[in-house]
């Protein structure tokens, strides 16, 4: 058997063990798969450095370990330098409108909490959840006129409560 075919056969036989070792290092399946693939790629590119008769598994594991150390160091550097991807979504965005809306929502929700139950459920279904009058009436098992009058009273009470604050 030539040293090249010996190398290929040994590397193929080593794959399940390499995958387990990569998982032990990375503790994450996706990272372990990436590490194992990078290790095989590096081993194939560097096959001339392996000496026939020496332990292939030790040589391949050393490659995997060195790659993992490099990855951990790179992640540490990126974490110090890079912002999370979500931060890019707000660049150039004025947060005041969203903040004002959140404050308004909190005020409205607090005021809704002070409405009587029958008004609050109708206001929530129609104004918040977007149900139609007929749907809300069927859901609550009430006549549509009752739903309509509760909504009017609830809306008026809500406006009065918001005007107080």
Image: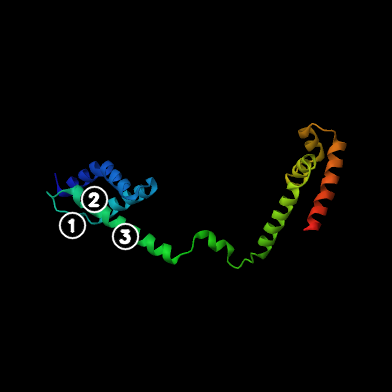
Q: SS at mark 2?
A: helix
The single residue placed furthest to the left in the displayed view is 53
Asked if the residues shown at circle 2 and circle 3 are in contact, with their CB atoms under 8 angstroms apart, the answer is no
Residue beneath the point at 21% across and 54% down: 47
CA separation in Å, label 2 and label 3? 14 Å
Residue beneath the point at 30% across and 44% down: 19
Q: SS at mark 3?
A: helix
Tag 1: Cα neighbours inside 10 Å, few (<14), some, or many (≥20)? few
For residue 70, which numbered disc appears in the image? 3
Tell me: residue 145, above or below residue 112: above
The residue singled out by tag 2 in the image is: 61
CA separation in Å, label 1 and label 3? 20 Å
Foreground residue, 141 or 91?
A: 141
The residue singled out by tag 1 in the image is: 49
Q: SS at mark 1?
A: helix
CA separation in Å, label 1 and label 2? 14 Å
């Amino acid at each position: 058997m030539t040293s090249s075919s010996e190398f290929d056969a040994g590397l193929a036989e080593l794959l399940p063990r390499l995958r387990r070792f990569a998982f032990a290092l990375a503790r994450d399946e996706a990272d372990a798969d990436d590490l194992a693939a990078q290790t095989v790629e590096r081993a194939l590119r560097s096959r001339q450095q392996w000496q026939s008769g020496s332990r292939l598994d030790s040589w391949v594991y050393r490659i995997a370990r060195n790659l993992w150390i490099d990855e951990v160091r790179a992640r540490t550097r990126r974490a110090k330098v890079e912002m999370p991807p979500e931060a890019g979504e707000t660049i150039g965005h004025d947060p005041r409108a969203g903040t004002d809306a959140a404050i308004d929502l909190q005020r409205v929700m607090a005021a809704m909490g002070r409405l009587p139950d029958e008004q609050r459920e109708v206001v929530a279904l129609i104004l918040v959840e977007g149900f139609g009058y007929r749907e809300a009436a069927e859901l609550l098992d009430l006549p549509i006129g009752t739903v309509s009058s509760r909504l009017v009273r609830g809306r008026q009470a809500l406006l009065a409560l918001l005007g107080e604050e």
